[in-house]
Image (cartoon, helix red, strand yellow):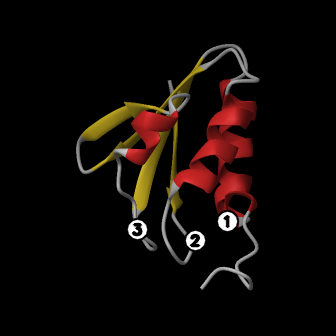
Amino acid sequence: MLKRKVIVRNEVGLHARPAKNLVTELNKYSSDVFIEKDDYRVNAKSIIGVLTLAAVKGTELLITAEGDDAEEVLDLVERMFQECLGENPQVVT
């Protein structure tokens, strides 16, 4: 099982639109992917699970992946969080 930490950079946190973007991309991979915040762990391929994290800007999340494409998935997740999960940080208020 591979692990990586990411930080929520979106101004309004990990709300529905970026969560959908994340879940849509993760469901293209075969690995099992989980997100953990403060000992609370959810399936990263479930939009409801991701939204229950209630992750605000600055929240540190631990991403774990297990499977044949786990390293690729973690690279994708890291890149997506760095790019505000598909939201333009200049547009977000």
Q: Which mark is residue 38?
A: none
Q: Secondary structure at mark 2?
A: loop
In the visual, does 49 lie left or right of 1?
left
Going by the numbered disc 1, the residue's amino acid type is Cys
User: Alpha carbon of mark 1 to alpha carbon of mark 3: how far?
Assistant: 12 Å
Question: Mark 2 near mark 1, Cβ–Cβ under 8 Å?
Answer: yes
**Mark before the other along the chain sequence, 1 or 3:** 3
Callout 3: few (<14), some (14-19), or many (20+) C-alpha neighbours within 10 Å?
some
For the C terminus, which image quadrant? bottom right
Total numbered circles: 3
Callout 1: few (<14), some (14-19), or many (20+) C-alpha neighbours within 10 Å?
some
- Which residue is the site of mark 2? 10
State which quadrant residue 26 falls in. Answer: top right
Q: Secondary structure at mark 3?
A: loop
91 or 36, which is in the foreground? Answer: 91
Image location of residue 41, percent across then percent down:
32, 35
State which quadrant residue 67 falls in. Answer: top right
Image location of residue 44, percent across then percent down:
51, 33
Image location of residue 39, percent across then percent down:
23, 42
**Mark before the other along the chain sequence, 2 or 3:** 2
Furthest residue toward left: 39
Q: Secondary structure at mark 1?
A: helix
Going by the numbered disc 2, the residue's amino acid type is Asn
In the visual, does 61 lie left or right of 39?
right
Q: Is residue 49 above or below residue 4?
A: above
In the visual, does 30 lie left or right of 38?
right
User: Alpha carbon of mark 2 to alpha carbon of mark 1: how far?
Assistant: 5 Å
Image location of residue 88, percent across then percent down:
76, 73
- Which residue is the site of mark 3? 56
**Mark before the other along the chain sequence, 2 or 1:** 2
Residue located at (69% from left, 46% from top): 21
- Which residue is the site of mark 1? 84
